[in-house]
C-alpha cells in the first residue's frame, strides 16, 4: 500500500473509532464521579488516558494488518504517559516534571544516525553533545506544549497543528515510515480535541504531555530540530514570559469570566493571556488567536524546511 494512502487510513480510521467511543466513556466517567468541577459542571479528567488506550488499540490493529511501527518510540511515549498519570495522582513537585522525563528519551539514542543539526542552510555537527541535548529537547517540547494549559483545547489543538506540519515535511522527505507511529496518535488526538474544546466535555490531565513528546520525537528522528523550534515559537515566548514574571515573584491568577462571556485577566504574564488582557475576548476567541499564531509559525517552519 502506498505510504500516502496508508497514512490516511491510519489517521482517519483511528479518528473515527475514537470519535465514536469518546461519548460512551465520558458518560461512564461521570457516573463514577471521576470528574472535576469546571464552570459549575462536572467534567471528566481522564481524557489523556483514553487517548493512550485508543492509540494503543489502533497500533495493535494496524500491526495485525502488517504495518510496522517503531516500538521504541511508542515505549518512550508510554513512559511520558505513565509519568503524567502518576503526576495527576500524587501531585509530585513541579521540578520533577522537568528532570524525570529527560530519562524517558534515552532509548532513542541508538537510533541517532547523525549528530548534526541544520539551521538556515548551515550544518552544525554537535558530536557527542547531541546525545546529551536530544533527551532535553524532547522533554522541553513535551512541557512547552502543555505549559499552563488554562484554555480548553489549547494544548491538544496546537500540538496537532505542529505535529501534522512535521509529519507533512517528513512525508515529502520520504521519512514518514520512520515516524508512522505518530499517525494513529494524530487521529485519536484530533477526536479528543473535539470534546476537549470549550466548553470542554473532557479534560486531558497531565497524560496529555505525550502530545508534546510526540512533536519532539518526530522532530529529532526526521532531523527537523530547528524546524520544530520555529514551529514552537509561540510556546517559547509563552514560557519566557511565564519564567520572567515568575522570577519577579508575579504569578498569574486564574482568569474569571465576565457576564458578557469575555475573560477577565488579572495579570498578562503569558502570551495566551496577553491579548485577552488588552482586548475583550472570549475563551474561544483567545484560543483561535493562539491557533493562528501557531499556524503561522508552522507555515514559516515549512517554508524554511523547503528552502533547506
Image (cartoon, rainbow, N blue to C red):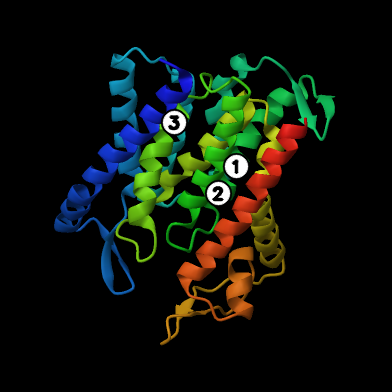
Q: Earlier in the sequence, mark 1 or mark 3?
A: 1
User: Which secondary structure, mark 2?
Assistant: helix
Q: Nearer the viewer, mark 2 or mark 3?
A: 3
Name the residue: 47% across, 20% down. Answer: 3
Q: Residue furthest bottom?
A: 259
> Quick check: can you spot residue 258?
yes
Q: Position of residue 80 (x, y in %)?
A: 46, 36
Q: Which residue is mark 1?
A: 141
Q: Looking at the rendering, which quadrant does residue 106 occupy?
A: top right
Q: Position of residue 270 (x, y in %)?
A: 63, 65
Q: Which mark is residue 293?
A: none
- Above-or-below relation of 97 to 53: below
Q: Looking at the rendering, which quadrant does residue 203 occupy?
A: bottom left
Q: Toward the viewer: 146 or 57?
A: 57
Q: Which residue is mark 2?
A: 145
Name the residue: 59% across, 19% down. Answer: 174
Neighbor class of circle 3 (other Cα within 10 Å; few <14, some 14-19, many 20+) is many
Q: Which residue is mark 3?
A: 183
Disc 2 + disc 1, Cβ < 8 Å:
yes
Name the residue: 66% across, 65% down. Answer: 246
Q: Toward the viewer: 208 or 5?
A: 5
Q: Earlier in the sequence, mark 2 or mark 3?
A: 2
Q: Position of residue 153 (x, y in %)?
A: 43, 57
- Above-or-below relation of 101 to 193: above
Quadrant location of the C terminus?
top right
Q: CA distance from mark 1 to mark 3?
A: 18 Å
Q: CA distance from mark 2 to mark 1?
A: 6 Å
Q: Nearer the viewer, mark 1 or mark 3?
A: 3
Amino acid at each position: 500500500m502506498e505510504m500516502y494512502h496508508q497514512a490516511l487510513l491510519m489517521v482517519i480510521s483511528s479518528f473515527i473509532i475514537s470519535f465514536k467511543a469518546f461519548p460512551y466513556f465520558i458518560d461512564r466517567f461521570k457516573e463514577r464521579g471521576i470528574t472535576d468541577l469546571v464552570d459549575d459542571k462536572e467534567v471528566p479528567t481522564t481524557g489523556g488516558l483514553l487517548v493512550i488506550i485508543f492509540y494503543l488499540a489502533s497500533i495493535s490493529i494496524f500491526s495485525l494488518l502488517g504495518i510496522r511501527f517503531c516500538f521504541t518510540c511508542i515505549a518512550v511515549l508510554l513512559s511520558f504517559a505513565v509519568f503524567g498519570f502518576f503526576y495527576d495522582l500524587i501531585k509530585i513537585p513541579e521540578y520533577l516534571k522537568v528532570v524525570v522525563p529527560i530519562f524517558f528519551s534515552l532509548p532513542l539514542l541508538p537510533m541517532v544516525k547523525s549528530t548534526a543539526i541544520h539551521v538556515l542552510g548551515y550544518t552544525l555537527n554537535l558530536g557527542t553533545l547531541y546525545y546529551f541535548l536530544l533527551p532535553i529537547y524532547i522533554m522541553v517540547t513535551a512541557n512547552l506544549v502543555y505549559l499552563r494549559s488554562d484554555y480548553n483545547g489549547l494544548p491538544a489543538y496546537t500540538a496537532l497543528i505542529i505535529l501534522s506540519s512535521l509529519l507533512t515535511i517528513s512525508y515529502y522527505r520520504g521519512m514518514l515510515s520512520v515516524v508512522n507511529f505518530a499517525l494513529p496518535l494524530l487521529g485519536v488526538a484530533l477526536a479528543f480535541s473535539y470534546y476537549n474544546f470549550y466548553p470542554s466535555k473532557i479534560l486531558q490531565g497531565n497524560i496529555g504531555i505525550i502530545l508534546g513528546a510526540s512533536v519532539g520525537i518526530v522532530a529529532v528522528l526526521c532531523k527537523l530540530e530547528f524546524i520544530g523550534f520555529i514551529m514552537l515559537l509561540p510556546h517559547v515566548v509563552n514560557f519566557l514570559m511565564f519564567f520572567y514574571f515568575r522570577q519577579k515573584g508575579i504569578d498569574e491568577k486564574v482568569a474569571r469570566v465576565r457576564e458578557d462571556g469575555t475573560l477577565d485577566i488579572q495579570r498578562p504574564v503569558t502570551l495566551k493571556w496577553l491579548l485577552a488582557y488588552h482586548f475583550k475576548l472570549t475563551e474561544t476567541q483567545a484560543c483561535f488567536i493562539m491557533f493562528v499564531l501557531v499556524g503561522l509559525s508552522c507555515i514559516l517552519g515549512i517554508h524554511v524546511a523547503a528552502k533547506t
